[in-house]
Amino acid sequence: MNKNGEYYFNRVYLVFSILLTVLVIGYTGAILYTVGFNSRIVWMSVLFLVIVFVVGGASVWSLKCRIAGVVNNLDDVIDGAINGQDRVTGYMETNISSLENKLIRYIDLSTTHDKKVEAEKNKIKELISDISHQTKTPLANIVLYSQLLDEHSHSGLDEDTQGFVTQIKSQADKLDWLIQSLIKLSRLETGIISIHATINPIIESISKAVSQVYTHAEHKNIEIAIDCDQAITARHDMKWTSEALFNIMDNAVKYSDTTGKIHIAAQANEMFTRIDISDTGIGIDNSELNDIFKRFYRCKATSKYEGVGIGLFLAREIINSQGGYIMASSTVGQGSTFSVYLLRM
Amino acid sequence: MSILQIQDLKKYYGQGDHVVKALDGISLTVEKGEFVAIVGTSGSGKSTLLHMLGGLDRATEGKVYVDGNDLFDMNDDKLTIFRRRSVGFIFQSYNLIPILNVYENIVLPIELDGARVDKGYVNQVIETLGLKEKVNNLPANLSGGQQQRVAIARALATKPSIVLADEPTGNLDSKTSQEVLILMKQMSQKFNQTIVMITHNEGIAQTADRVIRIEDGQIASRSEAGRR
Amino acid sequence: MISTGNGKSVSNIARKSLKANRMRNLMIVCAIVLTTLLLTSVFTMALSVNKSMELASMKTVGSDFHGGFKYLNQDEVAKLIQHPSIKEYSRATVVGDINSGVFKNNRVEINFVDENHFKHSFIHFIEGGLPSEENEIAMNTWELDLLGAPHEIGTKVNLDIDIDGTMGDKVISQDFVVSGYFEADQYVAMSGLAYVSEAFVQKNIADIDTEISKADGSYTNTIRLDVMFNNSLDIEGKVKKVLSDTGIDAPYGVNWAYASVSIFEDWTNIIPYVVLIFIIMLSGYLLIYNIFHISVVRDIKFYGLLKTIGTTPKQLRKVISIQANRLYLIALPIGLAAGYGVGCWITPMMTSSFSMTEMEASYSVNPLIFIGAALFSYMTVRIAASKPGRTASKISPVEAVRYAGISSGGSRKKTKRSVNGAKLSRMSLGNILRNKKKLFLMLASLSLSIILFSIIFTVISSFDVNKYLNTFISGDLVMKEESFAGSRNSEVDQYMLTEEVTDVLGKIDGVESLDKVYYQWDGLPIDDTIRSVLEPLIVVAEPHPAIAETLESGVIRLQLHGIEGGWYDVLKQKEIMEGTFDRAKFDSGDYVMITEAILDEDVNASYYHPGDKIKLGSMGKSYEVMAVLKQEAFYAAGAQRYSPFGFNVYLPANEMKATFADAQILSVTLHVNPAKLDEVDRTVRAVAEATKGLNVRSREDYRQEMAGFMTVFKTVGYSLSFIIGLIGVLNYINTVITGVVSRRNEFATLESIGMTKKQMKRMLVYEGFYSILLTALIVGTLGMFLTYQIAKTLADNLAWTVFRMNAWPIVAVILILMVIAYIVTITAYRMLSKSTIVERLRVAE
């Protein structure tokens, strides 16, 4: 087939029609010449020509439809193969069927490859999960013993040793927190724990998160205000969402000085429900706004604070897997606002 | 291979002393799946750039490659068909066809191509954009945000190589703007869609993966706004 | 309040806007010119035809004086001319008349008139002038012909002038020298005229006592004073006033040409003109409205901008109306002048077709024409520009900045239940149905034009020559007594068409048959039956001038026709008003068929009805009325003359022959073998040449006479239908272009998301196709039906058409429309794609 495709076809039609017309006219003319002018003959020839054109046109048109049908069939075949559905044409003695066969073979090959890669990834994830699980017990023991050591230390340990003991305890705590988060994360990623998002009022999830952070906040004399209508709902998993919200609020408390304020406001929009958590903390530099959600990322300004850099990462994973989104905006020295978007339906 | 390559793009209007340099040597690469924002004030040349990318206008100098295709090597008809299959447009004023309902507007580019609609995919897009209820409505009966969502769906329906958005939130209020942006971002991630958005609003630009600033027809700064 | 001086700025804007839109201005001016032209020509036609009719009547009367006083003497004249209401006058002295010799059948009146008389009569000297010497005389051309004298000044003629009427025998016989001669219509005026000099009067009749001459009926030396008043209203009243004011009692005459004949008399005559005017205005309105609308839509951003910077809606409307007015003023003189020209050109065609008699076209220069046309035209322009003006004024500035053209205007539809509508053909359909009102208007106007065109065309093509000719001549050749061929007198002492002549004709080789019509006039005494019909006519507001006379005379004139068998078949069923035609009964000779009598213009009624008995004096027998026929039945057989309030009576020829031994033959019609037609024609004409007083007409002669009429009919008809069709098509083109232009932005969007030019063209072509399809549906069904009905009714009622259903106009027009639609669509698209997508999109932003 040459480049012009359709034009080529049209030209063929045109040539043939002209040929036909000329033929009929010539034939008619010849007859009239021999027999003498008879209007009836003329009319019949015209009729003949018209009928031939109609028939010709009809056959061309039906051929066109057939071909279109064949192409559509191919289309279905490809779609089916891509989506991993059953063979469309089955095992038939047609070109299309054998074409389908080839196609399925090829797709099988690539799917297998993909599957292998997937399997590899999962293996790694499982490994991590196992490791974190396995380390839980030894870690628990270390924490236990370091606590015991700490208690006993009050009776007859010198200052240095006391200091070492405290260090061990705090590091153990940190390690514990890290392992816990990692376990949660890996479980989340491998899908052992699944998130069930249902439509619920968010006030509960917010309250739950607030209650967990309340003591810490009170300790630092930080005021928490909640501005949330009872009726506002969102499609979310309450347990996991409150965990994510807790992580954010925890940061808010952590990075705020004493007598700060934390304001939680909820708003139902058309597609999303939005929860704003604003604090009067140290703020985040603009250049780091997107980095803070990275795994183990800690802002330069937070060096003197406790923290692993995994809370926001976890929060984002949780929210994203519910079809939501977290955004941050901040002014250094004044405070930050974290906006959590959850799907409404 | 990057999905979009711009090489030393220049667009000059007029001649001699009155030359207006809308674009004065832009070079840029965009990878597949990126959400890039191009920021600039009015007259900075960002609209011109976008029109070039979509093959709506031709450059004075320079090259644009979309998915390996040299745009300026194609004639008008080819460009139109290229646009239909490989580019999705989202305009500031939505530009929906008033006599077609939501579904018809979305599948219009596909039907223009005479191709068959991948119903599964289209329905998925419609659902993700929250338009399932409104599928039979006429554009006149939709809010601004809803209309823009229809435009987004239309842009995505053909699974284009690249989606070009021209101030997509320009006519929307702040709340709706946020929502539309978040949706665009999600689309980008979910369907691995490359999006190039132009805007004059810094805050909006921040939603993107990468922000490129244009001033007086040249790139002023690039910043990595961070990966997803 | 004191208004701000912002009128100037508004007109400034209007002026700039005019300058910027040359193309549009040109189109509007053309449209206005067309409208004005048509209106003016219609007005001109109407008034000119009216004037021509008046003129024709006046020619019959002889002058255009408003009124006149008769049989006055010098003193009375002197008194009358003093009256203030008489603006102009002229004196005509009755001298005598010539009624012997060659003028036996064509009386000539001799008068002495003053110069003023000529101004108001219809006499124009071909050569020479009024006589001054005593032996000079001015005569008209046919009088000279009868005398056998050449048309030259100085010719000597010998005349016998009878100066004391039929009673006396004083005759002045002398030689005269022709001082001048003039053209006169032999058949229009009542009698011939000739003029003598004052000298002659002084010499011969100046001393005749008017009282005596009045008494003996010769009226010699009496003076007739013709007067002109200020205007022609209530002439009779004015005349009477003059008489009463001066205390003179004299008979007076009122020029009834002013009173009775006018097309405005009869409302039904005006209707076609009114309809025509209405159609013209409507089409003009549509055209102009469309052009303005497109213009406003194109410049919507401009108007929105104006609004933003503070122009009030009223001012915006003014901007548009000022432009409309200026363009109107430019177009007006052109339209008026051209229209007057066209009207004058058409008028002769109308006048010659209006009546069977010759009517000279007179052109009315009544200022009313121009004022009326200008007024109507202005109304059209004003109304047409008002709606776009309102559109422009109502635009909200923000919307104007991104006006997308025609909004889907008030479509209440919220949802649309289809999932496969993005196919091009469906989109086209949706596009057309977008604005139902506009679609309806366009379809209506287009269909209307096509249907009108079809009706007119069908009627014209139903023209059947033979049917037309049959009203004049039933066979191939007809020979008539010349005295019947036009002159008024029926008293002749020698008939030239005799039985011998007809026998000769009958023997000519090739003549297959001949039918004779015998003639006799009769006077029917007015009996109660007749009186009961006539009397109510006197008491109406404007009685016919002749009715009083007729009633007084006590007799109404009948024309008896004895028809031979061949004529029986000529009678058409629809010519029979009452009763039935029974051949056998008719042949028996005891029955007659009578026609209706003409009571007034277009008012006919029959005195008698089937079953009544009439006594015909001349026949000396009573007959029973078998049927009442229409006035024009047996037209070809009749004498083609009408006496007021009289009617025709048809009897079998044998009846008349039985009663009158030497019955007068009115005509003989020959039916000829077609192969021998030429020969017979020549032979018959030779016979007529040989015998003076015979008149031959062949079918071919009539055909040629009527050819002119047919041409006129066809020309007017075809042009009219063409214009109507054209207007419809122009309107369609306008609508299409508006639709395309205002959807510019939408098309830009479509192109940006990937619709190729070819697809766009296809969509537009589909749209055109759909609208033509819809039109074809309407026209094919309703149109065919209407064409059939209306054309059939018209054709049946017109004497010269035989209804022939013609579907070709509609089919042809639809085909042409398709071609036009295609061309227009492609052109409209080309207009669009001139600017690049970016520019168009930018507009959308």
Image (cartoon, coloured by chain):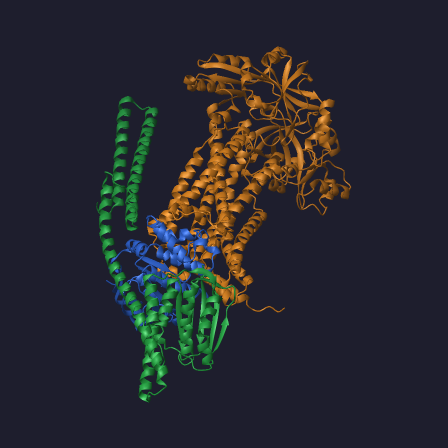
Q: Is residue C749 visible?
A: no
| Image height of C613 relative to C317, above or below | above
| Image height of C368 relative to A61, above or below | below
| Image height of C379 relative to A157, above or below | above
The residue at 43%/42% (across/down) is C772
Image coordinates of residue B183 in percent, x first then y, are 39, 62
| Image height of A311 relative to B59, above or below | below
Of residues B115 and A73, which is closer to you in this image? A73
Image coordinates of residue A306 in percent, x first then y, are 36, 79
Q: Residue furthest right?
A: C247
Q: Quadrant of the C terminus of chain C?
A: bottom left
Image coordinates of residue A303 in percent, x first then y, are 34, 81
Q: Chain A colour? A: green
Q: Chain B colour? A: blue
Query: What is the count of numbered marks?
Result: 0
Of residues C607 and C323, which is closer to you in this image? C323
C652 to the left or right of C337:
right
Chain coloured orange in the rendered structure: C
Q: Quadrant of the N terminus of chain C?
A: bottom right
Of residues B136 and C742, which is closer to you in this image? B136
Where residue B225 sits, quadrant-wise, is: bottom left
Image coordinates of residue B60 in percent, x first then y, are 27, 65
Q: Is residue C652 visible?
A: yes
Of residues C422 and A79, which is closer to you in this image? A79
